[in-house]
Amino acid sequence: MLLHCKSRVPFYRDLICEDTARRRPLDALAELTLANKAKIRANYLGFISSDLIRRRSDRELMQDLLNDRSNFANDTEVRLSNGDSIFLEKTSGSTGIPLKIVKSREERIIAGKSLWRLRKALDSSVSPMSLFPFEHAPLGFSFPYDLSDYSPENLRNILAEIGRRGYTWLHGHPQGIEWWAEAVLDDPSMQGLVRFSYIESNGSKLSPESRSLIQRAFACPVIDHYGCMEVWTVAYECRLQRLHVNEELILAEILGERGETISEPGRMGRLFITSLGSFAMPFLRYDLGDWVEYTGSNCDCGNRSPTIQVVPGRPNERIAGREDLFGRDVFGKVTRFLYGAYAIQYSQIRVVQTRPDTFQVYVSDFAGDRAEFTARFLEVSRALLSSDRIRIEMRFVEPNAPIFSDHPYDLFICRCNDPEDPLARSLKEGAGSR
């Protein structure tokens, strides 16, 4: 990978030493500057392999596709001048502007096979035909019921159809699965509609409380898949529910606040990854934005790869002004209380904090008294946040509104904590928000 980047990736040509081939790879890697989303967004073409840019038309195509104004669906296939295909992906954008990512067809196949090997280590019978995609549905997948409708009647139909089709694995975001689990626990007659062997949580930190609730509802283990769009699988849990680094695809570094390498179990640091199979757009010493605790490499499951525990709390997950509180926890309590106490119906909800005392609440497909819902939401929010200064800007929107497009199951996003967030910068500069 280092030799490839030295010869073919512009950003690294002058950073990687000429004698890299004669040195220990880890020593050469440790000398490289750290990379992050902002650095890549500022110089996309510098991080793309020259193998993909053989003609002026290829360069112009990349410039058009990778600028911040371009918009494309995930998994968009694009043909280069030589006839080869590349695939365009993007991060959720929950921490600001989405990062555009380029992969070759071969790289996606390798990443996909790696994930399936991890799944089969738990259950040799699992296959694409037995895994229900609550999220990341494959091309051509069809299902007769709306997965964003959490009403008890619709959920009963969903679970009955999943059971009828014989799915034994469920893959999805922990927030969405938790909403299903709460409904099932409220109506235990739904528990017999489907029998899962495993539930795979993906897309957000799986809290112990969420794991416990989901396992009680569906009577099966919940496995955490720590992934990112850049490399797909960063780490995956074993049968003992310990999170193992996926050394087949990445090299992981945990760095302390002074840049020192963390190698003692029990210590926390920031996680940086180096992709081992991403040659179209390599990631070397790349900051994922997460803090993790190193928990050792001796696991009774027999896997000797390092184990980590993700520490919850990206800046955009915490409530600004109350950094001890996570937005999804606070507003999860608000929505659960209102849903249970007032039988309010809606399909999606998202809370966006734009100022320390201001929260925009987007609700789609709402059925009920809007004025009462707004007043109750404000009342409960103020009680949980212990502040009468809280303002709620309620916005009732159509299903699948753009506000939900980046990640439909992220209940809360703070837009005034993250220094990379354009809105955060505008707030600090006094520009305010609309």
Image (cartoon, grey):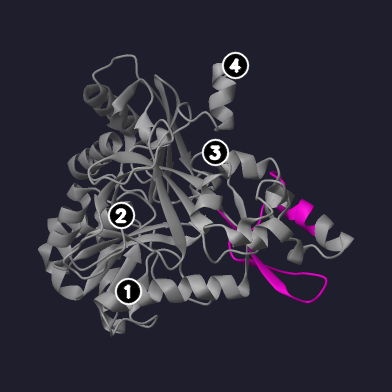
**Residue beneath label 4, please?**
429
Q: Position of residue 48 (x, y in %)?
A: 70, 56
Between the residue at mark 2 and the residue at mark 1, the CA separation in whole angstroms equals 18 Å
Query: Where does label 2 land, which residue?
Result: 174
Disc 4 + disc 3, Cβ < 8 Å: no
Chain part drawn in magenta: 61-90
Label whose residue precedes the other's in the sequence (3 or 1) = 3
Residue located 26% across and 63% down the image: 223
| Badge nearest the viewer, 3 or 1 | 1
Q: Quadrant of the C terminus?
A: top right
- Please name the amino acid that badge 3 sits on: Gly
Q: Earlier in the sequence, mark 4 or mark 1?
A: 1
Q: Nearer the viewer, residue 167 or 275?
A: 275
| Residue matched to label 3 | 96
Which residue is located at x 30 percent, y 36 percent? Answer: 331
Residue identified by numbered label 1: 119
